[in-house]
Amino acid sequence: MTEILLLFCAYLIGSVPTAVWVSKGVFGMDIREYGSGNAGATNTFRVLGPKAGTFVMVVDMLKGVLAVRLAYLVSYYHDPEHLTQLVNLQIGLGLTAVVGHIFPIWANFRGGKGIATLFGLVLAIQPVVALCCVGVFLMILFLTRYVSLSSIIASIAFPVLILYIFNEPEIYYRIFAIAVALMVVLTHQKNITRLLKGNESKVPLFRNRKEKH
């Protein structure tokens, strides 16, 4: 019963529609009516710029971190002997927060793709792996300025790191890593199509630097 309550709380945390509230409260518009129509960090970067996009991304990441940390409210999971159960609950809480981000109750169930919240989940459970994925993401973003492509490649790097580099022994986490990569690829089908056609929007993170040259 306690776990069910925690999962419900995780969903409510994930449902906080950061991009929608920022776009309406600060810019007087609904981010879902512009750009890709997605209420996530990527579309916020495109439409509202790097500052707003960075804020939305950080807050959405923290939603995943906070959801995972809910597991520690139950003393049972403090025991090292229950590590497997702890990881399983953390994954469940994090994924529930991702579902909340995609289908937020506070924003008529029209949210984002959950990438930042998903990253927050990984950051809370496997911070070293998460930082490696950040490195991959930033490298691809620097080279291409495509947030979608950076997210896809970083998500694919996740199971590679878990399975082959860090050799994570927990079977459920290995399965989770593979599922994450598949989910990100599936939720970015439209972006992949635009990338192949050359129509995907770039984030102007380095525009000023280029203009100086």
Image (tube, rainbow, N blue to C red):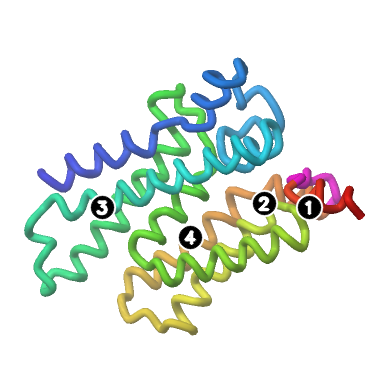
Q: Nearer the viewer, mark 3 or mark 2?
A: 3
Residue at screen point 53% across, 62% down: 181
Kind of residue at disc 2: Ser
Q: Which residue is mark 2?
A: 148
Question: How many numbered marks does the figure carry?
Answer: 4
Task: Give how far across and how far down residue 97 sits, in percent.
Answer: 36, 44
- Location of residue 22 in the rendering, given as x and y in whole percent from the top left corner: 53, 26
Task: Check the image and report above or below for 126 versus 161.
Answer: above
Q: Amino acid at mark 4?
A: Val
Q: Determine which residue is flagged by label 1.
A: 195
Q: What kind of element bears circle 3?
A: helix
- The answer to whether residue 11 is above or below residue 177 is above
Q: Which residue is mark 3?
A: 69
Gap in angstroms between the C-alphas marked 3 and 2 = 28 Å
Dot in front, 2 or 1: 2
Q: Check whether the beta carbons of the residues at disc 3 and disc 1 lie within 8 A of each other.
A: no
Magenta stretch, main secondary structure class? loop
Dot 2 lies on which element?
A: helix
Q: Which residues are magenta?
A: 197-204
User: Which is nearer the N-term, disc 3 or disc 1?
Assistant: 3
Write down the quadrant of residue 91 in the picture.
bottom left
Residue plotted at (39% across, 33% down): 15
Instruction: Name the element at disc 1.
Output: helix
Query: Badges 4 and 1: C-beta atoms under 8 Å apart?
Result: no
Amino acid type indicated by mark 1: Leu
Check residue 180 in the rendering and tell me which mark sits there, or answer none. Answer: 4
Q: Are marks 2 and 1 in contact (CB under 8 Å)?
A: yes
> Mark 3 or mark 4: which is in front?
3
Percent x, y of residue 184:
56, 55
Nearest to viewer (mark 3 / mark 1): 3
